[in-house]
Amino acid sequence: MLSFLLDEHISPKVGTQLQKKLPEITVRALQTWQQGRYLQASDELLLTVAAQHSLTLVTYDTRTIPTLLRSLAVQGQHHSGIVFIDQKTIAASDIGKLTKALLSLWKAENKSMWTDRIMFLRSPR
């Protein structure tokens, strides 16, 4: 089942709104998840811990994460999925639009396997 880990550039309000609209969704905000212990953690550690908890990382980081994913693939390491967001498509400050897009994604893909899956979040309709 699809469960989200929102990176530190995404407001925890997105998680609150998602759970308010759909209580069965599992969503964790990096700022509050495990008392914020993984804030400022390396991308590699973050992906490892997310995988241990079966959480798909939701991130705006299209600069460093793709390089790391290639490196992990070469090493035969797996992750629990990545949902990339483009600032030009959905601004980080647009909590409503981001919530709606993640809600649509979850409804369409929550039963899919997310191991090693990568996708870009689309703007909601």
Image: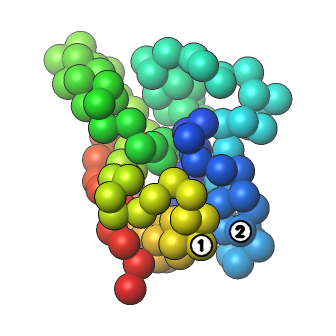
Q: Is residue 19 left or right of residue 5?
A: right
| Residue pointed to by mark 2 | 17
Residue under the image location 51 percent in, 72 percent down: 97
User: Given the image, on which type of amino acid does mark 2 rest?
Assistant: Gln
Foreground: 93 or 19? 93
Q: Position of residue 4 (x, y in %)?
A: 56, 51
Instruction: Provide the secondary structure element on which disc 1 rests.
Output: helix
User: Which class describes the residues within 10 Å of circle 1: few (<14), some (14-19), or many (20+)?
Assistant: some
Instruction: Work out whether 44 lies above or below 95.
Output: above
Q: Position of residue 50 (x, y in %)?
A: 54, 33
Foreground: 112 or 99? 99
Instruction: Work out whether 67 lies above or below 122.
Output: above
* Mark 1 and mark 2: Cα distance apart in space: 8 Å
User: Given the image, on which type of amino acid does mark 1 rest?
Assistant: Gly
| Residue pointed to by mark 1 | 96
User: Which class describes the residues within 10 Å of circle 2: few (<14), some (14-19), or many (20+)?
Assistant: some
Q: Position of residue 47 (x, y in %)?
A: 47, 27
Foreground: 108 or 102? 102
Q: Is residue 113 left or right of residue 37?
A: left
Instruction: Work out whether 30 lies above or below 87.
Output: above
Residue under the image location 59 percent in, 72 percent down: 96
Instruction: Provide the secondary structure element on which disc 2 rests.
Output: helix
Residue under the image location 36 percent in, 49 percent down: 84
Q: Are marks 1 and 2 in contact (CB under 8 Å)?
A: yes
Q: Residue furthest bottom?
A: 125
